[in-house]
Image (spheres, rainbow, N blue to C red):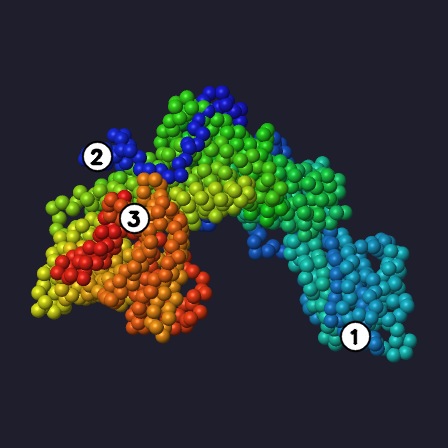
Amino acid sequence: MTALLDLKSSVLRQVQRSQSLRSRREPPTPTPGSPLTHSPDPLPRRISEESAEFFERMNAVLQKQENMLRAAQAECQRGACTVPPPQEHVDQAFIADRISRTELDLLYEEAVYTVVNRVGVHSAEHVKSDEELFTYMLKVFDMGEEEHDIILQKVQEANRASFSLRVSVLKAKSLMAKDANGYSDPYCMLGILVGQSPREVEEKKERKFSFRKRKEKLEKRSSTKEVLPARCIHVTEVKPETLNPVWDEHFVFEIDDAHNDLLHLDIWDHDDDVSVAEACKKLNEVSGLRGMGRYFKQIAKSMRADGSASSGSEDNADDFLGCINIPLNEIPVVGYDTWFKLEPRSSASKVQGECHLMLKLFTNQRDTTLSKKDSNVSIHKKLLSQIVEYEHANVKKEPYNWNGQVGPPGWTVLTHHAVQTDLSPLQQAIIRWQCYSSHHRTQRVCYSLLLRLLRTIDADWDPPAVRGDLERQLSDSFRLYTEHCLCLMKNMRQVFPCTSAAAITRYELMLRGIGYMQNMRAFKTVCPLRNELHLDITTAVKKGATEWYESLIARYKPEDGTLEEQLKKLVQVVDAVVADIQRAQKIYNKLFYSAVKVDFFSISYRQLEKQLNSFDLQVADDVNVAMERVCGTLEQESSKLTQTMGETIFELFMSLKILKGFREFLPLKDAKMLALTVFHNWFKSSIHKWLQIIHDRSCDRIRKAVETDQLEPVQEAKHSSSAVEVATCFSQVREIWLQLAWPDSAGAFIFVTRLTDNFCSEAVCYSEMITRKIERNQLGRDNKSFTVQLCIALNNTEHVRVFLGRLPQDLDWQGVERAMEESCGAEGKDQVYKALNGQLFNMDLDLQREAKRLITLLTDKMLPELRRYIQHISLSPDSINNDDAVSPLMKYLQDTMSILTENLVKENLTRALQSMWELLLRMILDAVTENRGVQVEFYNRFQYTVEAALQFFHAKGEGLSLEDMKSGDYKVLDEELRLNKCSSFELIEQYYLEKISHQKTLKHTRFGRISVKCYYDAPEQRLTVEILHAADIIALDANGLSDPFVIVELCPHHLFPMAKSQRTQVKLKTLHPVFDELFYFHVSPEQYRHRFACLTFTVMDYDWLSTNDFAGEAMAPLSDFCWPGRPNASPAGKSVQPVILHLSRSKPSEKPIMRMLEARIGDREAQEFVRRLKEIEKSMEEE
């Protein structure tokens, strides 16, 4: 920790504070050093290779977390591994002292004595031969033959061991019912029969023994003056009214001859008040054979010859239920624990059922040196330790995985010694645990063995049986093993690495063992104060994490070297911490939680928050210090961030982000306290520089992609390799941003704006470069190949445009908007929306502009051919039908359409067809306007051409929509053709229709207005026009006034050939003249029914010395006054309100109709009409 804190004193204060971002970035001006320079000489190949390598390295950094996860999963799915796990080194304080040679000799004597005094039936796994056992013991104790002979002779001269038999009468089942109630009242009577001669053995085969024959045995055995020992016969309690009695009573018999004596047991049904049971209980009061005779006499009275009850006075005698005879030499070494079938006394007896007995022979006196000064438990423990050490030393395959099994000779010696010294199963289990756990601290054994031993202790646990030294020794063994395991937990990264399957298996078993231990009844009894083992485990884990991190810092030494080297070492440190946390979460935590209910991951990760005893805040402090030094250094170097430094900073950021990401597995209360929560602030300045580096590398990559692009479609697509490369580049940059996952809303807005700006400028730059490449490639290429390449270039631009259209989703603009709304309100949200969408909108306009440039290149190539085919239509004689005249053009369009359809995507095809349609319309319009005044057939043919082209581009709904095509130039051309096909009178009528329509749209004009009243007398067919006054007439004289008068006439003249124009009086020097004059016109119904029939009011300024000046005009259709049903078309029309008409002064020559009429030179009506309008226009120009 202190080593990394020294970083604060030497370097950095880095990266500039966020460049100002423009809402729209123009393509940078090419400079010799810019990646976007377009010069004849390409940039050095090295730069492009560096860009490719740059993105490869970035991709590797982005995949770091995925690779780490994959590695962790591989460790979790580890298979069988034969590589031994690392050594489990522990402190020497845990290692017990070795036994001395003198003690070893005494222990060997004990072992020899055990072998010499063996009793019982050997099991299959035991060794019967003394020689084989002695040979084994010589190896175990490293004893010579001569020393063995001396010790053997000493044992043979010593007193033989004295044996006792422990009998446990547990229960019986399925006994015969002797009472009237269908039950019996059973009890057992048992004793030891002395050894028998061979003749007696033969007699025994003919009849069974009964205690009534006991007298004869006693007479043969001892003097009549001896007192009969109490050990001879014992009796159990009577269990009333049952056929399945449970006694669970225990007896001990001293054995004179363990090889020949026999255990006899009778089961009786108790019937009277004074019976065999009571007599047996008074056996201790019987002295000599006379008393014993009376005892057996009482038994004899209770028996019948056939074992059934007799009549008369003997009705209350006990009934015989069965017996068992067990020779002691048939008892196994480890004793009996089984059911024995009841036997009859003779062939006439009827018995049934079984009795459950436990039998065990043991020594009550041993003539060895150790047995006189040490406890049996201690001796057996030393003997087991010696054998275990020998057996383990001879294990060749995976000694660390030894299951504790000893060979048959060793097992034989240990079994006989345990039996002879009367060690209970619980004592043996405790001894085995003490021995193996102690041995494990120096030589590893399988943890499943230790767990099995703990379970054995727990299963046999009996607190009263464990007192004194044994209790203290068990407590010490638990304590030492616990401390040993805690030491291993502290060093778990070295002792139980995840890379070793065997080590992890061992670790899991160890944790299960320590977890099982703390819940054992034995542990809670002998270690009552150690009831918080999980706290000890937590402490060990914390201490281990601290020591591991300190070793990590010592290994990498991030304070040494240049700044860049320091950052790289810091990346290694953080990656190592990430890998460790990942193992904690994926592997170790499961082991700890399932075994000891300790959250290993949370404990390890929380260490990142501790300053003194852990490693996480140290990581936070170390990185923070390093980034401060980076910032300082960059400021000293004029804010220049090298690419290598930028890559290192980015990798460090990603590593810290991965580390921070593990907090989602922490409890919420812990996650809120993380020092890494705001780690992104350390990188805020450098990220701006980093984005600039990415932009530069992207530009270089795009330039190289355009240079190497052959403009050939990629596989099934219709775009080329450069579009794929640009989209890939954008995807990688987008992924870089997504992996950054900047949490600060304000910072995210700035960075997203910057990224969007970069994307947009790079896309526009790409489209410009691809357009220039097409422009350079058009020279020397045939039309078709150039068209194909141009289509591919169009598709490239569209491919990039569509890709960037997903930026709002890819960069999560909505998320940024929500974050800004939460922090800055609705204003912040609007700012994000306007800034980001403004950039995207401008980029889209620029890309469409470039697409239009490319389409213009396409249509420019088509101009000569289209011009030739339209000229062909224009010059075709009338004798050729329309289809023949138009077919060359349609074939050319069909051929061009085939190429475009095959090579353009749908969006670009639509754009190209629209441009072709608009170009064709303009060219036809030019042809028509150049040929005004020709015959109608000329216009009919072009009308046919337009309709044929319309259907061609519509393609029955598969092409352009009719609505889109019938707008703009189409309307102009259609109107041009329609008017050119009209006669001069029809054009004049159309002129007045347009004037009438225009008049209706006028509301207020600067030329003033005139007030009139018109009404029609239908019977007289007379139209009365009353001109009342005018207002706001424009000043046309030098004095700022005018001398206005009004000319009123019926138009058009060819409809009213007899009507003469009329005029009002001149009103001098006024702009608001009042006329109040009446005028009469003859108008027939045939005349006023035409929509174009109208009254024309022309206001003129009277000049004495020159022609009158035009002040304005207004139109009033006759249909407003003359049609039946109108208020003006009745006698009451005089009382109607006057009509106010606004004046206008438009130039007639601006209208297409004027140009068409003017072109008809031979038409007198047309020329006369044009002449009059030109006079008015001329007066307007003179003003």
Residue at position x 9%, y 61% from top?
A: 875
Q: Amino acid at mark 3?
A: Tyr
Above-or-below relation of 176 to 1095: below
Comparing 896 with 1119, the one in front is 1119
Q: Position of residue 654 (x, y in %)?
A: 45, 38
Residue found 59% across the figure and 49% down from its top: 594
Most distant residue in the bottom direction: 311
Q: Amino acid at mark 1?
A: Ala
Q: CA distance from mark 1 to mark 2?
A: 120 Å
Give SS at disc 3.
loop
Which residue was labeled with disc 2? 39
Q: CA distance from mark 2 to mark 3?
A: 71 Å
Q: Residue 483: x percent and y percent?
A: 62, 36
Q: Which residue in the structure is indicated by mark 3?
A: 1102
| Mark 3 Cα shell of 10 Å, populated few (<14), some (14-19), many (≥20) | many
Would you say the residues marked 2 and 3 are in contact, meaning their CB atoms lie under 8 Å apart? Answer: no
Q: Nearer the viewer, residue 988 or 107?
A: 988
Left or right, residue 254 beside residue 517:
right
Residue mark closest to the camera, 1 vs 2: 2
Horizontal relation, residue 669 to residue 807: left or right: right
Q: Nearer the viewer, mark 3 or mark 1?
A: 3
**Residue 462: x and y, percent?**
73, 49
Residue marked by disc 1:
177
Q: Observer-nearest residue: 807 or 170? A: 807
Which is nearer the N-term, disc 3 or disc 1?
Answer: 1
Q: Residues within 10 Å of mark 2 (few under 14, many from 20)?
A: few
Q: How many discs mark residues in the rendered view?
A: 3
Of 114 and 195, the residue lying toward us: 114
Quick check: 826 above or below 318? above
